[in-house]
Image (cartoon, grey):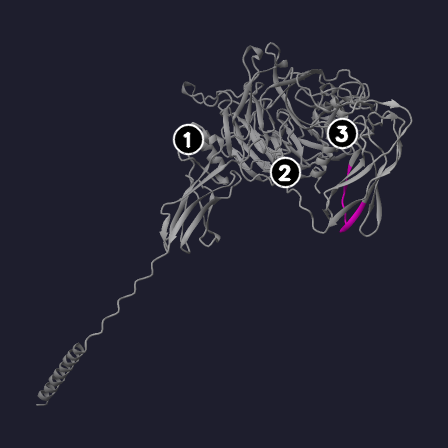
Amino acid sequence: MTKNKNTAIAVSVFLIAAMAIALFPLNVVTGQETRVTYAYIGATPNPVGVGQETLLHIGMMQQLSVTQQGWDGLTVTVKHPDGSTETLGPFRTDSTGGTGYSFVPQQEGEYILQTHFPEQVTTANKVPPSTAVGTIMLESYSPELTLVVQAEPIPVYQEHPLPTEYWTRPIDSQLRGWAPVAGSRLEPNGFGGELMNPGNDDAPETAHILWRHPLVLGGLAGGDLGDAGTYTGDAYEGKFTNSLIIQGILIYQKFDTIGGTNVPNWHVGVDLHTGEILWEKEFYAYDDPTDSRLYPSFGQIFYWDSFNAHGTHAYLVCTSSAGGFFAPTGAAWHFFDPLTARYLFTWENAPSGTRNRGPHGEIIIYNVNLGADTMRMWNSSAVIDAYWGTTPNSPVWGSWRPQGKVTNAQGSVAVTPATPLGLNGYQWEVSIPADLTGSVVDYKIDDRIVGYDWEAETSSPFGGTMGVTEITIWGISLKPGNEGNLLFKETWNAPSTWADGDVSNSLAAASIDDGAIVFWAKELRHLVGFSTETGKHIWGPTESTNYLDYLGHQSGMAYGRYFSQGMSGILYCYNATTGDLMWTYEADDPYNQVLWSNQWHIRPIIIADGKLYMGTTEHSPVDPLTRGGPFVAVDIETGEEVFRADGLFRQTEWGGRAIIGDSIIATMDTYDLQVYGVGKGPSATKVSISSDIVTEGDSVMVKGHVTDISPGTEEYGLRARFPDGVPAICDDNMTEWMLYVYKQFERPADMIGVDVTISVLDPNNNFYEVGTTTSDESGFYRLMFEPLVPGEYTVYAWFGGSNAYYPSFSETALGVLQASPPTAPPTPTPAPMTDTYVLGLGLASLIAIVVIGLLVILMLRKR
């Protein structure tokens, strides 16, 4: 039996508990009496196949007063078909009196199961409604249950495959297998943004554009200003900032923040799949236009799972002082609905610190106070003032109802199982070792915190710390029951070149999941790695990278790899735990646009689906902008190009960079200041036959078009240029084609379309392929074939899809008439006998005359 079925039954049990609590008042009395009990046992499914799960329902038919209570010590005796016996348990029930256990039988035949409820005495923490504390609940045995186990597996619900056609939101919740391609981006992708983006397992492999929107007036100014272009926001005034993707909704800031509340400013919600604008709104604290203006800070998808309710809640969160790059962290979180931008509630006094995401999407913040030698954990799901009610032993404890409330997110509350410190959100506080200094660099929930410190002379005016003599790496446990324990503290003596020279050192990247903390020495352009498992030095210094990497160094980690890149335009990929150089990628500049290098400066932006996406940026680019700036995707394993789009999606240094969700990239392009959706789009295939009734033996011409029907192709400008539709073009030509279609570059020569397969269903119901052809740069294709037998045909034209397009097909009909049988030549009429005589006589006379003539000639010669 599947886990899903188990979950469904468990949910039902919890619902029964909730109803039971609501129906029975908490009427507890004292006294001494006995009560007969009735144990039970059930199994679902029954029958079941060998090796399949069946969910045992184990319990006693008496619910308890509150949801946290349960009966203890229940066991199940199982007699196997071979006569052997085993005992399952002991089990503790929930407040309904029952619980579940997944049992997997391994023998064919009949199993006999029986629940035993042991005698126990009620207490204040374990008592049924209207039952006295101290009541003896008598021992009981359930009736025996026969579980039939058969050799053949029973049918189970088959998981739906990943989408093979163009898809949109919402995703029906029954399509559970789609989760790997339906990720969200809940934190902005700005300075220090997280590179890794799970849930995008069909990330783009071409530069195919789905749609676009103008962000602000952009591109070439023209006229007397010549080649001058619109200001991109670099430096310090970035556009497209604080962009997020929440369950298929792209949210971005329309303008920069310059001018504050003296100028209108709003945000936009866009359907990531269709490009449809869902809303435009200015955000204010408490949704009050007279209060401070807000800017999106992060998103949350929180799964509430309790005895009352189960399901996710999606939020767009704006903090009270978010804004420009230099803005401080806000103290109030204002929650809005991502679909409609409707205001929902506010949490004041929210804690500062790194937002970690728990298994249910809850936000977990660790407050590590190295001065006070303490550490506390704040969990957003434990802000109990957001519950329906704050009394644990009541039905209201089981519902998440923050709407309309203004809550102190760290305020005083009752001490409850969720708030043992008596403060909203805080679930524990522990002491930590007293000799730790420096800074925390990474967290892993229920595992560890890792930090570092170093001995150094001074901070460098050009970034980093100078004169580093040693580095100390330390780790603190977060494992339940061991919180605060020291895992390691290791000190490494730095090379003399660091301490003696004017070398600027900085933290490059840290990832517990990838096992390493990496430091960068700017002037020497080398790297050093330390283990997040032990704190020990594990590799480096590496060989020096290109000299230009002393400027603009960027890095990140994912898939057990560390990526290093600077102004040289060379990306270095190292094994994160060994420091081995695995591959390099050079973003060559074939037209010498870059003034300081033979390569473009590229910055790692997104890692998803085994691909690393990079784009060119510059701190303060001159105008006119260098042309042909690349947007590149490379294979994580090999560094080989997946695709490269020169001049399509130039990135920004100070604004919002490309983000990904639902396996679609959304990005601003600084060449024209438009927002683009990039990913696999829908196609349309049309087919026709001019002469759809032919005679057997004749050939027919099948023809049609394959077009791109992505939402962006509905723009008037594109419909005017492509009245028959935008042709679908092969993956290898996609970048040049998108520049032509969406950027109005000159039409490229020698474009190749897509492969189209022609198949038929013949009059005898035989289905077979008759040929494959390739469409041209107009999307047009054709193929001639000769039908084999007379009758009615269905003809199919099938485009099987590509990395840029989902598949499409069309069909038409063909009639083949049976050819008429060939006409036989007429039989000659026999001549009459008289004619034969005459003919014979005439011929004989002619021969006689010839012979006589010859004899006369011979006689004359003899004379």
Residue occupied by mark 3: 17
Residue occupied by mark 2: 177
Kindly report which numbered mark, 3 or 2, lies closer to the viewer in this rendering: 3
As shown in the figure, which amino acid type bears the numbered disc 1? Arg
Q: Quadrant of residue 45?
A: top right
Prevailing SS of the magenta stretch: strand
Residue occupying image coordinates x 60% and y 9%: 290
As shown in the figure, which amino acid type bears the numbered disc 2? Gly
Is 505 situated left or right of 799 in this image? right
Can residue 625 be seen here? no
Q: Secondary structure at mark 3?
A: helix
Q: For the C terminus, which image quadrant?
A: bottom left
Q: Residue 802 in the image: x percent, y percent?
A: 52, 41
Q: Residue furthest right?
A: 32
Q: Return the disc, 1 or 3, that comes first in the chain's sequence.
A: 3
Q: Quadrant of residue 46?
A: top right
Q: Find the magenta span and give its range.
A: 100-112
Q: Residue 538 in the image: x percent, y percent?
A: 75, 36
Q: Secondary structure at mark 1?
A: helix
Residue occupied by mark 1: 719
Q: Return the disc, 3 or 2, that comes first in the chain's sequence.
A: 3
